[in-house]
Amino acid sequence: MSSPVARSEVFADRSLFGHPKGLGLLFITEMWERFSYYGMRALLVLYLVNAQHWTTARAATLYGNYTMLAFLTPLVGGYLADRVIGTRRSLVIGGIIIAAGHFTLALQGDAAFYTGLGLIILGTGFFKSNVSTQVGQIYADGDARRDAGFTIFYVGINTGAFLGPIVCGYLAASPNFGWHYGFAAAGVGMVLGLITYLWGREKYLPGIGLPNFGMTESKTDGIKSSGIAGSNPMHGVGGAVVGGVIGFVGGGWLGLAMCAVIGGALGIAILGSHGEERRRVYAIFIVAFFVVFFWAAYEQAGSSMNLFADRNTDLTLGGRLSTPIPAAWFQSVNSAFILIFAPIFALMWTMLAKRKLEPSTAMKMVIGLMLLGTGFVFMVIGAKGADQGIRVSWIWLTTAYLFHTLGELCLSPIGLSYVTKVAPVRFASLMMGVWFLANAAANKLAGTIAAMVEKIPTLTQFYTIFVISSFSAAFLMLFCVPLLKRLTSSVKA
């Protein structure tokens, strides 16, 4: 465990444009990890449909299952980091396993393909929630820089997410290389991120990520918190059993896994807390519920919208190019917009906070859902031409991604910050895992809906689903804003 002096130095550091240098290290580490994840993600459905000749429904279902599990395992990884190994060891373990998974995908054969996906899922569990938790740990309680810091960190995520599809998509589409070179390039990205973190963690993140870093007296009961001390592990076991039975009845083995983890998280966090802490845990679960609606629509990007680019969009960009661009490159559009607008949003939140006009996190999420729905309005317009057999302009897909990006900036980095502020300190990584659990459920739902794209009569009708779901969730969440404020009245959220 780090010394109080080391903590003080980390919290007070303002040498990186007003933020700690450790933020820069985590920025670069996460950038390369996201390069690997989004580089492979951009290829997955296209590879299965175009190279392996899978049906759209089968490819979309596997995509949904893979992305669901990639967001589900961080809940378990967060629990282990909280209780046993700390976030810094978890990051290293996860990075090694992720890299091994991408390099395995570069090999030929079904066994290598499924093994590679499994390794990436496992490694992501150790890596993903814990790097975000470390960002929260470099800011002291009440530090006004936290939201801006998470937005800057989000730029790192999206720098990697921008570069990954460009590099991996180019290699996959090139006749001189091919699909497996694209998968291998993703592995190289993860190795670079791991090397960067190991090089700088002692210098720029002293003590951060060690077990129990930042554990303090509870604000509500004065009881020392250590790991998840004070909670009964049987709460998690009981919740997992009940949730697993429900999930198996409703959705087979994957339903069992999903609901068992949900039940375990509910059991540990809710039954293991009380009073003001428990109210804050309730708030996180309520917010996570609405996040499912956002990501289930947003994650069409890797499946149905990816295929829309490949099959229904003019990849010569209106005849300006003699050679069509790779369809996977459209997976970088969202990240390019984030790189443009994230600094503007970070500045905007800071300025509004100084004037005491900043919306609550819940209200920002309402705005994000509305912007997402607006983006799908443009998909509906573009789909009308596609339904007539026309390869439509790239403008429709690009404009949809623009509004999705603006919505994401109101929801995702703010949500990460929200969890680190609201979660009881002894459940910090576990609650970050709950945030990613919402993403897991949403990705599974996104894949299930995308698998129906050829069963629904028209693309226009298909994308209308997300217009309706996004605006409906926004209006429902709007009514929950006062409740969320009451549940988190003890913290500024």
Image (tube, rainbow, N blue to C red):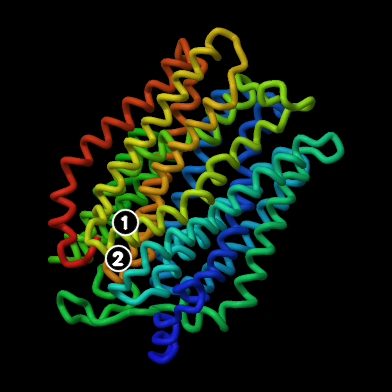
Q: Residues within 10 Å of mark 2 (few under 14, many from 20)?
A: many
**Along the viewing direction, whichever of 109 and 216 lies nearer the viewer:** 216
Q: Nearer the viewer, residue 242 or 57?
A: 57
Towards the viewer: 241 or 417: 417
Which residue lies under the disc numbered 2?
421
Residue occupying image coordinates x 71% and y 21%: 319
Residue 112 in view in this figure: no
Amino acid type, callout 1: Ala
Q: Is disc 2 placed on a helix, strand or loop?
A: helix
User: Residue 341: percent from the left, percent from the top?
Assistant: 47, 49
Q: Position of residue 168 (x, y in %)?
A: 71, 44
Q: Residues within 10 Å of mark 1 (few under 14, many from 20)?
A: many
Instruction: Please name the amino acid that badge 2 sits on.
Output: Lys
Q: CA distance from mark 2 to mark 1?
A: 18 Å
Residue beneath label 1, please? 265
In the displayed structure, would residue 213 be above or below residue 383?
A: below
Please tell me whether residue 374 is drawn above or below residue 91 in the rendered image.
above
Residue 493 at what x, y percent from top left?
24, 60
